[in-house]
Amino acid sequence: MAKVRKAVITAAGRGTRQYPASTAVQKEMFPLVDRDGLTKPVIQIIGEEAIDSGIEQICIITQPGEEGHYREYFRRLDDQMVKAFRGKDWAILESEKLGAFGDRLSFAEQHTPKVSATRFIRHESLSETIRFCCCWVITSISATSRTVAPGN
């Protein structure tokens, strides 16, 4: 099997299973404490695990108009904020990681609610194997991912 270099993370759901919390915070952005002890949104934890496994590009499937929220989060601190974090080397390092993560991102909008992302992916012409990651299992504080070969 070919090396898996691309991942798709689904983030277009409404978060109805996490109601009422999902009315305040998008379910993909729910904060969790990661293994490194830092609090991060679940989508970042999933993405970092994908990158650590060799993934080079990540496509996030979003609801229409949400790309900007992700772009705003996955970026490096600006100069003014770097000054505010002076002496907190861990924060500067995390900022660099967020920027590097953001550099790997692309986005696809899912315009119809309750359409399986798997069906969405199958409609795209895939010429290589991808890693399919879901954010919807966070009620048990875990993530689900599987490899999807072209045509599956």
Image: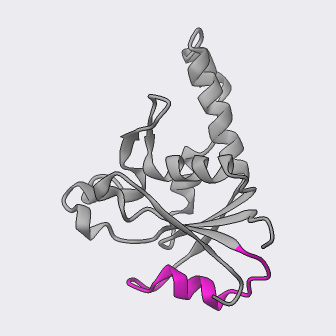
Whether residue 83 appears in this view of the structure is: yes
Please report the residue visible at 59 percent of the width from the left and 11 percent of the height from the top. Answer: 86
Say if 26 sits above or below 48 in the image: below
User: Magenta residues, as a range?
Assistant: 111-129
Q: Position of residue 120 (x, y in %)?
A: 56, 85
Task: Please say if 38 is above or below 111.
Answer: above
**Image quadrant in which you'd find residue 73:** top right
Residue 124 location, x and y as percent? Answer: 68, 86
Residue 93: quadrant of the picture: top right
Residue in the foreground of this view, choosing between 16 and 148: 148
State the quadrant of the C terminus.
bottom right
Q: Is residue 19 above or below residue 41?
A: below
> Quadrant of residue 34 in the image?
top left
Task: Identify which residue is drawn at 44% across, 58% down.
Answer: 143
From this viewpoint, which residue is outermost toward the left?
20
118 inside magenta stretch: yes
